[in-house]
Amino acid sequence: METRKYKSYVKTDEENKLNTFIGKRLKQIRNNRKITQTRLAKELNISFQQIGKYEKGQNGLNAIRLVELSTYLKVPYADLLPELLGEVKLPDDSSVSSHSESFENV
């Protein structure tokens, strides 16, 4: 049996909170625009299930996807992240370095 090279990654409470916050805003904006998950997914070339995961906070958005969504929905990307700095604790240097250690010797 081969040893895994990567450590399992468990999301922090802050990441879960951030994903949930962004997901709720995404759903709200999408519904206000009367756009279905299927239509949005087709425009972004992803599955409608992925849109659902974003909206439920199960998966996080990367920067490129955030820009694609804001462009298609015609909202500034900051509209998906309002009041964010007061709501989510940003990682300190130690948590960033501990995640990068997972990728050493790859």
Image: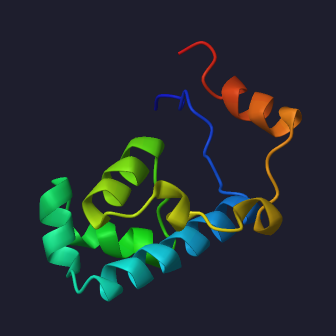
Front-lying residue, 51 or 32: 32
Front-lying residue, 2 or 53: 53
Residue at image location 26% in from the left, 72% down from the top:
49
Task: Specify whether 91 is left or right of 79.
Answer: right
Residue at image location 60% in from the left, 23% down from the top:
103
Which of the 4 image quadrants contains residue 84? bottom right
User: Is 87 located above or below residue 10 in the figure?
Assistant: below
Residue at image location 60% in from the left, 12% down from the top:
105
How many numbered tags mark residues here? 0
What x and y, as percent, mark residue 90?
79, 50
Task: Specify whether 12 is left or right of 74.
Answer: right
User: Residue most toward the top?
Assistant: 105
Front-lying residue, 68 or 90: 68
What x and y, as percent, mark residue 73?
30, 66
What x and y, as percent, mark residue 25?
50, 76
What x and y, as percent, mark residue 9?
62, 47
Front-lying residue, 63 or 72: 72
User: Is 25 located above or below residue 54 in the figure?
Assistant: below
Task: Specify whether 86 is left or right of 48.
Answer: right
Task: Specify whether 63 is left or right of 35.
Answer: right
